[in-house]
Amino acid sequence: MNKFTISLSALALCVIPVSADDISLGYCDGGNVEHPLTAESVAICMPAEEFPMYAGTKITGVRIGLMSDATKGVRVFLRNSTEGADIISFRTGMLYQGWSDILFDSPIDWPEGDFYAGYELSANLKAGMSHVGSLSCVPGSCWTSDGCVWKDRSAEGYAPLCIQLLVDGGSYEKNDVALISAEPVTVEAGSPFEITGLLRNNTSTILTGIRLSYDWGEGAREADAIVDETLPGEIGYFHLPVEEFYKTGETPVELRVISVAGAPDDYAFNDNTAVSVTGVSDIVPRKLLLEEFTGQMCSQCPAGKERIEDGIRHLDNIVLVCHHIGFGEDTMTAPGSRELLFFYNRSDGSSYAPALMFDRTPSEGNPGPVTEVPESRTIADRIKARQELGAQVTVGIDQNYEAGGELGIDVRLRKVKGMKTGDNPVLSVLLVENGIVSYQAPDYDDYLHDHVVRRFVTAPLGDAVTLTEDEEKTYSYKISIPDGYRPENMSVVAFVSNFNASDPNDCEVYNSETAPLPQGGGVGNVTDSDIHIEAIFDLTGRRLDSPQTGVNIVRYSDGTSRKVIMK
């Protein structure tokens, strides 16, 4: 969807007339068809109380997104209940993977009451799911049937199905915007800021702006919000500028729609939402903890690694670690890594790789924080959105190490004033190693493994700590570096998180830090003239005969590695 910016003075002209032959209406915003789902039948629910503005319109067909080709087509249906009789049933011809528009022979009237739109799947056919921001678990957005029982899978964290109604735009004349949600924001007290959230465009024109009010208990104020260009019937982001905010701590702010295109909003029931605004004296930059699950026997992991490297290439303040668990164990699995399977949160105990966690926060379409490795752009977008939230805790690392001796680690923690943390903070300290050349499936004998978690200094799921705003707490550890590790390639990683043993989705990381091991006496007597290139790798870890255009990973004879860009 194209995006553009207009000045606040132009917001009175906040809709652009278009020919609205069809309005696409659903929960997935016409997004990418990303996640496969196998079932006998799938459907979305359209509650009458949420979509009264469309009563009296004509439905011309449906859009569905498939994760595989349907050589024999599918049977789509509309019905008033999952078990009820069909209002309409329509058999398609052959459909291909991705989005398809399916038009009925003639339009039908918008059904009375709640109704369902869905289709039946044949053998080996996979439905598609997608997501829009925080809409991943909207009730009614993902119903499945095993042939006997229908179940609302959105309650299990499934993303919305790629199903949309096609509504005749010529039969629709309402002027309505529904506020759906707003993203929590952290702001330095006394500074202006912006509230970003999701809305549904229930008008018949492209939406680019609305007028909102906001109130944190001191009287309502109004401002014009810019809207990312949003098509009729679909979901988009709004951006509301807010005047100086002087409170510290967490404060609820009420938002309300005032007008759309300078005209009154037609429906009041969907005009309000709330957002949590946290005011702090100083904003501490967040270093996001990105945890990759991988394994030497995982043939898809090199491709996952490439997407991750591409996604973070131009980003700062990221701490990346790789757990060799999720696809079994191998020679680089740190003792205790199996406890991390807790974050998959799967009832059957299964796991997979390649996979990712972003600060151990809940992941769209998954029962726990662990998610499949998405496209590089999605990785970058999620990291940047998370980093916009200031860190709840400051983390500092001090070390003392001499080659062959013990490694002393001091981790300094302080809670940021005004920030909210959970009841069970824990500190995790890890030893991570780069530049390990070893086997990797499918057929690499000299693959370069980086960011490998070699040892948990604390318990694998962290040690309990106390967080205070009044003073900095220091936690100290002493360990020996095991034989066979390269201290010159190693770093200490420390991060603070909540830990809820009964809910892996309540284990948010508050901040993280990393620091290389001190090199005093640890490198030996190697001089610059002794150092030469030992091997060259691409971003997937595949060994190259010579440097290639783009990013190369060069390993030197002293055991160190660095990225070299060739043009």
Image (cartoon, rainbow, N blue to C red):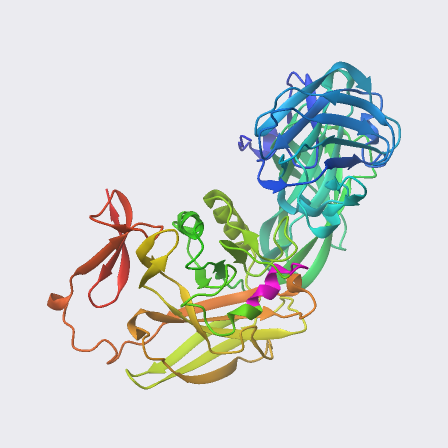
Return the x and y of residue 508 as percentages of the image width and height: 60, 63
| Residue lying furthest left | 529
| Residue lying furthest front | 123
The residue at 20%/78% (across/down) is 524
The residue at 67%/71% (across/down) is 501
Among the 4 quarters of the image, the one containing residue 440: bottom left
Residue 79 shown left or right of residue 189 in the figure: right
Does the magenta segment cover residue 369? no
Instruction: Reply above or below: 33 against 168.
Output: below
Instruction: Reply above or below: 520 against 197.
Output: below
| Front-lying residue, 150 or 196 | 150
Q: Which residues are magenta?
A: 340-348
Return the x and y of residue 449 as percentages of the image width and height: 36, 60
Residue 518 shown left or right of residue 47 in the figure: left
The residue at 31%/69% (across/down) is 489
Among the 4 quarters of the image, the one containing residue 485: bottom left
Residue 53 shown left or right of residue 336 in the figure: right
Return the x and y of residue 88 as percentages of the image width and height: 81, 22
> How many discs mark residues in the rendered view?
0
Classify the position of the N terminus by image quarter: top right
Instruction: Reply above or below: 54 against 417.
Output: above
Does the magenta segment cover residue 344? yes
Classify the position of the C terminus by image quarter: top left
| Front-lying residue, 321 or 273 | 321
Residue 184 in view here: yes
| Front-lying residue, 206 or 240 | 206
The residue at 68%/65% (across/down) is 503
Return the x and y of residue 525 as percentages of the image width and height: 16, 77
| Residue lying furthest top | 106
Residue 281 in view here: no
